[in-house]
Image (tube, rainbow, N blue to C red):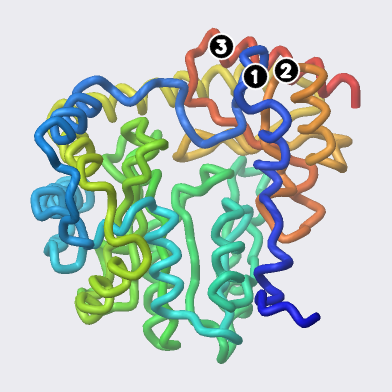
Amino acid sequence: MKSPIRPVIAQLKPSGISQVTALGLGNPDVLPLWFGETDLVTPPFIRKAAAQALEDGRTFYTNARGITPLREAISAFHKRTIGADIPIERITIPGAAMLAAVTALQMVCETGDNIVVVSPIWPNIFQAAKVVGAEPRLVRLEEDWNAGRWRLDMDKLFDACDERTKALFLASPGNPTGWMLTADEQKIILDFCRQRGIAILADEVYGTLVFDGSAHAPSFLSIADENDAVFGINSFSKPWAMTGWRVGWLVHPKSVENAAAAMAQCNNTGSTHFAQYGALAALSPEGEAFRASLLERCRAGRDVVEKWIGRQNRVRWMKPDGAFYGFLHVDGLKDSLGFCQRTVLDDHVGVSPGWAFSLGDPRDDSYLRICFAQDAARLEQALTRLEGAIRKL
């Protein structure tokens, strides 16, 4: 019997990360470094704001694009962090940042198109590209071990684009590498995309989690015109420890304001009403102080990992410029998924396989991703367990 299910959907599989977490999620004996989240609970002032909104009866439908005070606060956030004037007409809060990414893909891609993605990258984006019918084409960052940093080969990026390319997806700072685009690179990319009629999907979720003292990583939103095909994807999940809240936002061209409203209604009917008041509290001065303290927690965690690597003879990394991940190269590692699955069961530490962050590039199978936005003592304990697992290779 012929199935009505689209073949591309029938062939989708859980990500490599979920194939690891399924073995140990919820087990109190496992020290989890696998997800992209801190070990901190969302701060009390954010939880109280949402609880108060719930108590006040904020349980009804609201504007599917987000409540006006929150969109105004997001506009002000962009003004003070990247100096960009983003009117609320260009801001939509559809739900989680993943839904913002899917919405942007839906706006620009049709079956038969392709999207060029700078990798290694979080796996949800190339899965989402397949869901909308587009072919994901990964252009891998180059390891520059002498300089100690990841490098984007612009020629390779542009050569991957053809007449069917509808978008470039770039995460900066990146997950899992912590790589960060420079402002000059962004200008070159924007100029290329303008000439070719290609959209830019810019994941700026980790934009404020940078280690060079800047308020924010370089942003496409600060150099793009209001009707450039630039889509800024952002979230409250990471900087404010709100991963379970599923509140993110999309900055889109002014020309698609009506379409964004219609798509928000179709996809999710908007973000959870009372949760948006928690997000609003996150953008208060108290939220700014928390975000600064989380950055220092990440900086301390990065230092813990760097010292640990200094004691290893099989592990190296390129120190991340932003975000809160260590993408660790392990000499002799060939099957990162199998290693991570065994490590959960045998060593009670959860890490993510490098294999998950590409479409089968064997180079990434020599890597593991850890999240270092953790309590320093707990992180050191987890790394000690990981060291024991690596010795068994």
Left or right side of 226 for 31: right
Left or right side of 35 for 185: left
Q: Is residue 39 visible?
A: yes
Nearest the eye: 18 or 238:
18
Give the amino acid type for the residue marked by disc 3 in the picture.
Answer: Arg
Q: Are marks 2 and 3 in contact (CB under 8 Å)?
A: no
Q: Position of residue 221 (x, y in %)?
A: 27, 63
User: Residue beneath label 1, please?
Assistant: 27
| Residue drawn 58% across the image and 78% down it | 133
Q: CA distance from mark 2 to mark 3?
A: 13 Å
Nearest the eye: 310 or 166:
166
Q: Position of residue 112 (x, y in %)?
A: 60, 86
Q: Residue furthest front?
A: 1
Q: Are marks 1 and 2 in contact (CB under 8 Å)?
A: yes
Mark 1 or mark 3: which comes first in sequence? 1
Give the amino acid type for the residue marked by disc 2 in the picture.
Answer: His
The nearer-to-camera label among 1 and 2 is 1
User: Residue beneath label 2, please?
Assistant: 348
Give the amino acid type for the residue marked by disc 1 in the picture.
Answer: Asn
Nearest the eye: 185 or 113:
113
| Residue drawn 28% across the image and 52% down it | 271
User: Residue beneath label 3, please?
Assistant: 378
Q: 10 Å neighbourhood of mark 2: few (<14), some, or many (≥20)? A: many
The nearer-to-camera label among 1 and 3 is 1
Q: 10 Å neighbourhood of mark 3: few (<14), some, or many (≥20)? A: some
* Quarter of the figure that contains the N terminus: bottom right
Residue 38, quarter of picture = top left
